[in-house]
């Protein structure tokens, strides 16, 4: 794959995935809107064990995402379709905590749960969002990069 083709493919993937990056903003708006409703304050008390299960699954999504990225990018060079597939997987793992946080906030009526998992999502995006230099590295053989 030529560098120009790789760059075109990466930019096309960025254009397709950029709408999904608005998900944390949309969920923040939904949780904020719901927290102003009268039924929010009349909700059930927070359930401890389910809360911690959701929090641990959300944090585990980032760990699993890093492991999947390492496993899937080990066999190089990767084709453009494989690069797109791995990138979609990484974006899914990075955004999973905010979705889990929104569900948890609606279940427990605790805004702190949502915002803590929003912070985990932002860290996940910083760690897992595929950059162009990673695409370039993954599309070459390991010995080609050393030469």
Image (spheres, rainbow, N blue to C red):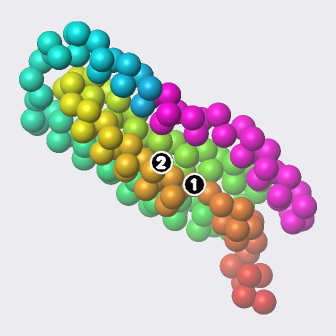
Residue 79 in percent (x, y) is at 76, 57
**Is 14 colored magenta in this rendering?**
yes
| Residue beneath disc 1 | 129
Q: Residues within 10 Å of mark 2 (few under 14, many from 20)?
A: many
Badge number at residue 94: 2
In the image: residue 141, left or right of residue 60? right
Specify few, some or many for label 1: CA neighbours under 10 Å numbering under 14, 14-19, or 20 or more. Answer: some
Q: Are dots 1 and 2 in contact, CB under 8 Å?
A: yes
Between 98 and 30, the one nearer to me in the picture: 30
Q: Residue at x 30, y 17 (%)?
A: 36
- Of mark 1 and mark 2, the one earlier in the sequence is 2
**Image height of 141 relative to 47, above or below:** below
Q: Is residue 34 above or below residue 99?
A: above
Q: In x, y percent, where is residue 23? A: 52, 33
Q: Quadrant of residue 22?
A: top right
Does the image show residue 77? no
In front: 18, or 83? 18
* Residue at 21 percent of width and 31 percent of height: 110
Q: Residue at x 57, y 59 (%)?
A: 72
Dot 2: what SS?
Answer: helix
Name the residue at 51% across, 52% down: 125
Query: Is 77 drawn above or below residue 141 in the view shown?
Result: above
Magenta span of residues = 1-27
Q: Residue furthest top?
A: 38
Q: Is residue 56 magenta?
A: no
Residue 142 in the image: above or below residue 36:
below
> Does 129 sit left or right of 116 as displayed?
right
């Amino acid at each position: 794959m030529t560098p120009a083709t790789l760059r075109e493919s990466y930019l096309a993937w960025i254009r397709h995935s950029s709408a999904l990056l608005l998900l944390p903003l949309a969920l923040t708006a939904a949780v904020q809107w719901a927290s102003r409703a009268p039924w929010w304050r009349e909700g059930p008390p927070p359930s401890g064990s389910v809360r911690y299960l959701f929090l641990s699954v959300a944090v585990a999504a980032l760990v699993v995402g890093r492991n999947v990225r390492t496993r899937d990018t080990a066999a190089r060079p990767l084709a453009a379709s494989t690069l797109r597939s791995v990138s979609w997987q990484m974006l899914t793992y990075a955004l999973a905590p905010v979705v889990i946080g929104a569900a948890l906030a609606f279940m427990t009526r605790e805004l702190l749960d949502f915002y803590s998992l929003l912070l985990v999502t932002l860290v996940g995006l910083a760690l897992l969002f595929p950059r162009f230099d990673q695409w370039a590295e993954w599309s070459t053989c390991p010995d080609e990069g050393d030469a």
